[in-house]
Amino acid sequence: MINLALETLLLGFAGEGAFAAPARAFFWGAEPHPLLRSWPEILGWQSHKGLADAWDRSGFARCDVPSGLWPLVMQLPGKARDEIHGGFAKAWDLVEPGGMLVAAMENGAGAARFEKDLAKVVGAVHSRQKHKCRVFGARKEIPSPAVMPEGWLDAGRRKPIPGTHFVTEAGVFSATKVDPGSQLLVESLPTNLRGKVADLGAGWGYLTDALLRRCPAVKQVDLFESDSRALDCARQNLAAQEAVLNFHWHDVTTGIPGRYDIILMNPPFHTRQMKDVALGRAFLNAARDALYPGGEIWLVANRQLPYEGVLDACGLLWRQVVRDPVFKVIHAVMPMEQP
């Protein structure tokens, strides 16, 4: 799937583009592109495992924690307002005096609004539009660079979900509250689950935390999550149970290693801004391949998502446990003997 924001970002440096590419650049939210191969030095940071792997396969350098000062920081900011504002603040800290911050977003994601937000803080912003996207950038002036608002700095910090013991970070799934689908799944789980468990798309750890409280016979849980930010939150949220947990920064759509007695999931179904049912199908196929005979899948999904046919194709026996106006909970079992 072509990322038009990425195409527009690099258009800003090509031909009559508004921005000059310096010898050194940092890419926040890095995604590979052939045009970057001609850049002398570029370092990327990417929280999503699949995109980080693609960046690595393309031969670019990548860091786990953004740091240093750079003459150019490029950014693909994300989706949520707090994530975008917090991302601007974090990226601005990486820009050296006299350097540039350049970002690109789809118009439908509010690019014009966020360009104006940035301009109110840093002053003059140069921009260009193409592919229904906008690329915009600002220079960190010398000797008095703009200072990011405290609200933006706070938006990028990890913080608690009110009324719970969980912490989350802007940009991760269900960052401000417990997801109601996941809550319905937890309420539907029996208390006698046991054995080796995998939590696919584990997020910040809600399902695993509830499972361990509800099912004392569970002795090991492997958490698989593609967003490193969410996984770091899960490590903090589950610190008291870490002796029975294994954390994996992993793209579940590529399959999962190991075999399991129980697999829990609330599969994602969006890629960037677009609905992508193939993600849920890939999760189910990965789960099928990782189940012991007699193993179980406990799944929650929006009720209109067509996962039942995938379960049939996987040879799993399934039943719908709960169905409300928004969600459905499905229990599927791997037969002891395969046809």
Image: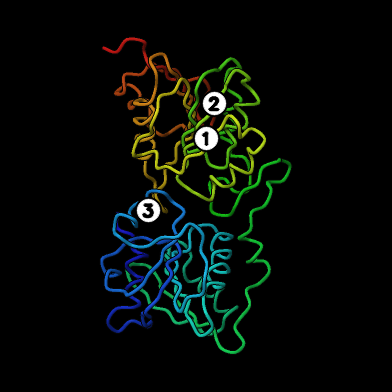
Q: Quadrant of residue 256?
A: top left
**Mark 1 element type:** strand
**Mark 3 element type:** helix
Relative image position of residue 261 (x, y in whole percent): 46, 20
Label 2 neighbour load within 10 Å: few <14, some 14-19, many 20+: some
**Which badge, 1 or 2, is on the more N-terminal residue?**
2
The relative height of residue 273 versus residue 39 in the rendered view (above or below) is: above
Give the position of the C terminus as an image quadrant: top left
Q: Quadrant of residue 234?
A: top right
Residue shown at the point (48%, 29%) measured from the top left: 198
The relative height of residue 166 versus residue 335 in the rendered view (above or below) is: below
Q: Which residue is mark 3?
A: 51
Disc ID at residue 220? 2
Q: Amino acid at mark 3?
A: Leu
Relative image position of residue 216 (x, y in whole percent): 63, 20
Relative image position of residue 312 (x, y in whole percent): 32, 21
Q: Residue furthest front?
A: 243
Residue shown at the point (31%, 19%) measured from the top left: 315
Residue shown at the point (53%, 44%) measured from the top left: 231
Q: Amino acid at mark 2?
A: Gln
Q: Residue furthest bottom?
A: 143
Determine contact: label 1, label 2, CB under 8 Å. Answer: yes
Between marks 1 and 3 in the image, the one whose residue lies nearer the viewer: 1
Disc ID at residue 124? none
Q: Amino acid at mark 1?
A: Asn
Q: Which residue is mark 1?
A: 246
